[in-house]
Image (cartoon, helix red, strand yellow):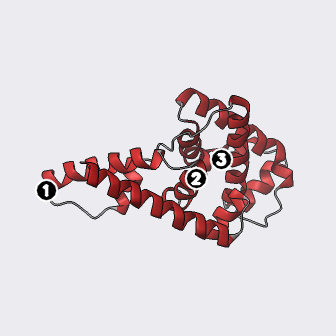
Amino acid sequence: MQDHELIEAAISGDEFALRRLHDLYVTQVFSYVYGQVASYHDAEEVLQDIFYKVAMKMNTFSGKSTFKTWVFSIARNTVLDYHRQAKKRNRSIATEEEKLRTLSPLTTSSEDEVILQDEIREALILMNELPETYRTVLHLRVIEEFTVEETAAIMKKSNFSVKALQRRARKMLQEHMHQEVMDA
């Protein structure tokens, strides 16, 4: 079944369709949420809130965006609520090493593999030092591979703002990496 068929069935009360939609997106949403709240337990609770909201608001999905974009919009808003309630600042994005590995060139030796692992860990540490909006835009664009338009919809920003945020985030990350090299 396609997303739109599952959505129609879920709106009609088909619990199997709702479970299927949940199963299609739960891993990606959890990865995003965990990166934003940096606590496995809190991420599980926020994830439950997100999918409860998805189920309750299913009939409001208009189809103006993809279902995935709509779910991530709910996820982002729920994460923002979490931060407001918890009054936490500067949370980290626990980026998946495997995702970053797929963006890296293939290694040919075990020595190259160790060096790559160290570089990925260092990039993650430095990424956690970025402001929240920079971490979010990098996570959505690089890790989740959303388009500029989808990222803009999720973050409630214009396409131009997303491009500018991404450019500034990458620049700041590069500056942090350069500083680390100079300090070493």
Question: Of label 2 and label 3, which has the lower sequence position?
Answer: 3
Q: Residue at x 59, y 42 (%)?
A: 33
Q: Residues within 10 Å of mark 2 (few under 14, many from 20)?
A: many
Q: Residue at x 78, y 49 (%)?
A: 10
Pointers 1 and 2 in contact (CB under 8 A)? no
For marks 1 and 3, give the CA distance: 41 Å
For marks 1 and 2, give the CA distance: 33 Å
Left/right placement of residue 66 relative to residue 111 reads right
**Residue type at tag 2:** Thr
Which corner quadrant holds the N terminus? bottom right
Query: Closer to the camera: disc 1 or disc 2?
Result: 2
Q: Kindly identify which residue carries mark 2.
A: 136
Residue 110, image x, y percentages: 14, 51
Q: Residues within 10 Å of mark 1 (few under 14, many from 20)?
A: few
Left/right placement of residue 16 relative to residue 141 reads right
Query: Closer to the camera: disc 1 or disc 3?
Result: 1
Q: Kindly identify which residue carries mark 3.
A: 20
Residue 92, image x, y percentages: 51, 41
Q: Residue furthest front?
A: 183
**Residue type at tag 3:** Arg
Looking at the image, residue 137 lies above or below residue 94: below
Pick the front one: 57 or 36: 36
For marks 2 and 3, give the CA distance: 27 Å
Helix, strand or loop at mark 1: loop
Q: Which mark is residue 109?
A: 1
Pick the front one: 128 or 36: 128
Question: Of label 1 and label 2, which has the lower sequence position?
Answer: 1
